[in-house]
């Protein structure tokens, strides 16, 4: 598979708990290269736009509230099979169901406050990366 890219966020619970360094170390140790990175805070409006695909799901309101509750770190990552390998590295959405050694198993607090985002397709990885970064910010 050609080298490609995925998009992640370190979510407010993990930033607040001081896990940025630990999570980035796991990402680097798994062979991902950082292409772009930004420490920022989402407004409810921006978080709502980012998660618009989930707008009809019951947890949408809480998700938007939570994702705008504190700073996040947005990152574009590069690796062979980036999207699928990163989903394996982060583990299941619900940390009680995540495999041992995954980022969510180690760092997530709950199904909502689950430490990290990971894109679910190459197409969404491109869309989500572009949501946060211009071409000039990626290298
Ligand atoms: O993040 P992932 O792709 O694993 O899960 P998702 O189904 O795309 O859901 C997006 C996010 O919504 C999750 O990461 C959770 O933060 C939140 N969520 C939730 O609060 N309650 C659920 N039952 C499912 C998801
Ligand atoms: Mg998802």
Image (cartoon, rainbow, N blue to C red):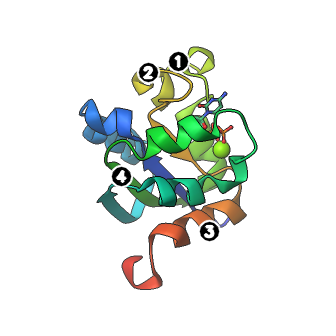
Q: Residues within 10 Å of mark 2 (few under 14, many from 20)?
A: some
On residue 109, which mark appears?
A: 2
**Residue at left offset 37%, top offset 39%:** 12
Give the labeled residue for mark 3: 126
Is the CB of mark 2 within 8 Å of ligand 1?
no
Outermost residue toward the right in this view = 56
Left or right: residue 6 compared with residue 25:
right
Mark number displayed over residue 73: 4
Sooner in the amino-acid sequence: mark 4 or mark 3: 4
- Picture layout, residue 120 above or below residue 110: below
Q: Distance of mark 2 from mark 1, alpha carbons? A: 15 Å
Contact between marks 3 and 2 (CB within 8 A): the answer is: no
- Residue 114 appearing in the image: yes
Left or right: 41, with 94 as reference point: left
In contact (CB < 8 Å): disc 4 and disc 3 = no
Mark pair 4, 3: CA separation: 17 Å
Where disc 3 sits, the SS reads: helix
Q: Please state the horizontal and vertical placement of residue 88, each as a whole percent of the image.
A: 61, 36
Q: Residues within 10 Å of mark 4 (few under 14, many from 20)?
A: some
Q: Is residue 139 above or below residue 61?
A: below
Q: Which mark is residue 100?
A: 1
Q: Residue furthest bottom?
A: 136
Mark 1 closeness class: few <14, some 14–19, many ≥20 residues within 10 Å: few
Residue 72, position in %: x, y?
36, 49
- Front disc: 3 or 2: 2
Mark positioned earlier in the residue sequence (3 or 2): 2
Disc nearest the viewer among 3 and 1:
3
Q: Is mark 4 within 8 Å of ligand 1?
A: no
Number of the label disc, if any, that sits on residue 131: none
Foreground of the two, 66 or 4: 66
């Amino acid at each position: 598979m050609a080298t490609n890219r995925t998009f992640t966020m370190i979510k407010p619970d993990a930033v607040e708990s001081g896990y940025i360094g630990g999570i980035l170390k796991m990402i680097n140790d798994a062979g991902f290269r950082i292409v772009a990175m930004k420490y920022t805070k989402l407004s409810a409006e921006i978080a709502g736009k980012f998660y618009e695909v989930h707008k009809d799901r019951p947890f949408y309101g809480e998700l938007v509230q939570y994702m705008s509750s504190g700073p996040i770190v947005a990152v574009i990552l590069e690796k062979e099979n980036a999207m699928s390998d990163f989903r394996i590295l982060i583990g299941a959405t619900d940390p009680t169901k995540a495999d041992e050694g995954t980022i969510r198993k180690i760092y997530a607090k709950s199904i909502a406050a689950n430490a990290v985002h990971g894109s679910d397709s190459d197409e969404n990885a491109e869309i989500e990366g572009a949501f946060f970064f211009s071409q000039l910010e990626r290298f």
